[in-house]
Image (cartoon, rainbow, N blue to C red):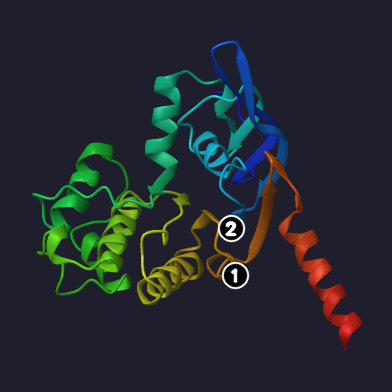
Amino acid sequence: MEKFPDRTIEAKNLSMTYRSGNIEVPALKNVSFRVEKGEFIAIMGPSGCGKSTLLHLLGGLMKPTSGRILIDGIDISTLTDSERTAVRRRKIGFVFQRFNLLPTLSAKGNIELAKKIHGNGSLGRNGIGEIVEMLGLRGKINSRPAELSGGEQQRVAIARALINQPSIILADEPTGSLDSKNAHTVLKKLRDLNEKLEQTIIMITHDSEAASTASRVIEMKDGQIHTPISKFEYESELRTAISVHE
């Protein structure tokens, strides 16, 4: 696998077109942006803007029609399916809107299953306990999904995504199925993980309140990015805006 200069994620002229019979439907159009290590990014936009397609491409679940995706310097757009799977297992944890927990397993069982499937990381004997404690799930670890609230189920799903210590968390509408109280709790936990573990997090959402949790917001519309700026450009613009209003 060829390696390029080290940034956690970089998309270069990324395009994705779906086919329906003889009709081509563009989902992404020449998208370019980069995410530095340890950033918490929210990608925001209305339904159909291409944000879910973008997340799936960044996670190596699909190959783009054209363009490149660099994950820790590796161009995953040139890899085979099995090679992309290997990169996902080592580097990426997914959190989905639907919790996708196995109903017959306890919270602990769901987390341990992810560990067995992926088989990487070195958390040690107390690793699950540390993650459970950080996510506020003590006392719930032996409960099955049906015995947990929506917010608790989503926190179990986050723990499952973290168990193999990925450098990147991709979250697809993680609060979309939650009430406001549980949504606030889940967003706070994601922010805590970003700050304490320095995890790079990319979260897609249509909710401006959820997006405000992130350190930077990227807006999408009609398959294109409307704020393709780096963390440093964003911070510079923010300082300028503050000074203008002082």
Q: Do the residues labelled 2 and 1 touch (CB within 8 Å)?
A: yes
- In the image, 87 versus 32, the foreground residue is 32
Residue 150 at x, y percent in the picture: 27, 65
Residue 12 lies left or right of residue 106; in this view the side is: right
Mark drawn on residue 132: none
Q: Name the residue under label 1.
A: 212
Query: Residue placed farthest to the right in the image?
Result: 244
Q: How crowded is mark 2: few (under 14 residues within 10 Å), some or many (20 or more)?
A: many
Residue type at mark 1?
A: Ser
Residue type at mark 2?
A: Ala
Residue 2 lies left or right of residue 192; in this view the side is: right
Residue 87 found in image quarter: top left
Judged from the image, the secondary structure of the residue bearing numbered disc 1 is loop
Q: Is residue 229 above or below residue 73?
A: below
Residue 89 found in image quarter: top left
Residue 194 at x, y percent in the picture: 49, 65
Q: Mark 2 points at which residue?
A: 42
Q: Which residue is drawn at 87% across and 74% down?
A: 240
Residue 236 at x, y percent in the picture: 82, 67
- In the image, 89 versus 215, the foreground residue is 215
Residue 35 at x, y percent in the picture: 64, 50
Q: Which residue is drawn at 62% across and 43% down?
A: 49
Residue 237 lies left or right of residue 159; in this view the side is: right
From the image, which quarter does the C terminus lie in?
bottom right
Q: Which residue is drawn at 67% across and 55% down?
A: 218
